[in-house]
Image (spheres, rainbow, N blue to C red):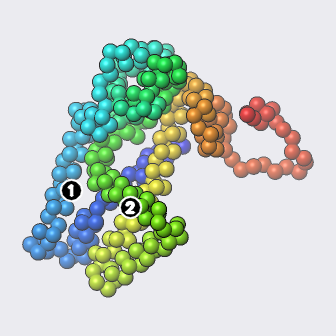
Amino acid sequence: MTLGRARRARARALVVPMLMSAPMWLVVGELTLGWYDPVRHLGRYGPAVLTLVVLLLLAAAADTGPGERWLARLVLRARAPRLHQRHTLAPVAQVLLRHGIPPQRLELLVGPGQQVDVTALGRRTVVVSRGLIDALWSGQLRPQQAAAVITHEVGVMRSGLTRHDPAIMVLLAPWTVWITWIAIMWGIAAAFLSHRVMVACLVIHAGVGIWLGATEDPAMYVSTVVMAVVLTTWWAIRSWDRARAQVGDQYLLQHDLAGVYADLLTATFTDDYTRDRAVRLRHPQLQPGPPVVGDGPPVASAELSTTGR
């Protein structure tokens, strides 16, 4: 995937969920229809409008250098590395230097996660998990493997895909709370109802929203719109994650760490998508395409025989 296609995937993943709450949709709907009376609806929609203005101001502040660091501390609970953590990461920094990635240009912070994980944020902040450092300390993870994981996120960051993530995180804060609440309620209902009943409830919900919008108040169409956004979120998140993966993989290929990262992927995951991704990292010359059907019997090629595992 080219960088342009990755950015379009990011737009699909982030712009659609920014439809954050029902009150804001009601305001937009009534403004569009010309029914909005500032005096009559000030008490009804005033808090929603004030919340939106505050979010925009906080998003602008978060998109600065200091705001990026504070957001990493508040949201990701990241802190500056301690002495023993810097000592553990020193061999990783040497690997990064050998592969042309100066770690001095990065703001390295340590998060509390227990899994091997690295998160790029903004323009220069990279948050490594405590689990990655513990794995390095115990010898479960080699410095080359840790450097490959960090390089992947550095590639995503330097491509520009995370440049405005601090502002996006602030803008999506109400949406995150809302979608978390929906996920909790869905999980509770799914424990008592079958999948078919749950789908039927969603269809009925959409039908009621359309009926109320047509007969009572067109602003009531918001219920159907919110449900559609919720159902779109899952697809949007998957598209954005895969765009990040492809951009980071290309950066790994440029810095000769793709093979190390592929070995780490295959040792950690066993699904088909990850295995295909590992093959593309080890053999970038292989491009996915339609199968070729010839007239004669199938013959194994040298290229195919060398990629079999």
Reply above or below: 184 against 116: below
Residue appearing at x 86%, y 45% in the figure: 298
Quarter of the image for the C terminus: give it. top right
Q: Residue furthest front?
A: 192
Q: Residues within 10 Å of mark 1 (few under 14, many from 20)?
A: some
Q: Residues within 10 Å of mark 2 (few under 14, many from 20)?
A: few
Q: Secondary structure at mark 2?
A: helix
The residue identified by callout 1 is 52
Report x, y in % for residue 185. 38, 61
At label 2, the amino acid type is Met
Frontmost residue, 16 versus 290? 16
Q: Secondary structure at mark 1?
A: helix
Report x, y in % for residue 184. 38, 57
Question: Would residue 145 be seen by someone viewing this image from the given angle?
Answer: yes
User: In the rendering, which numbered label is found on residue 185?
Assistant: 2
Frontmost residue, 171 versus 111? 111
Quarter of the image for the N terminus: give it. top right
At label 1, the amino acid type is Leu
Residue appearing at x 29%, y 40% in the figure: 75
Mark 1 / mark 2, whichever is N-terminal:
1
Side of 286 relative to 45 (left or right): right
Report x, y in % for residue 250. 53, 34
Q: Residue furthest left?
A: 39
Instruction: State which quadrant residue 166 falls in.
Output: top left
Q: CA distance from mark 1 to mark 2?
A: 25 Å
Reply above or below: 102 against 15: above
Side of 62 relative to 222 (left or right): left
Reply above or below: 296 against 263: below
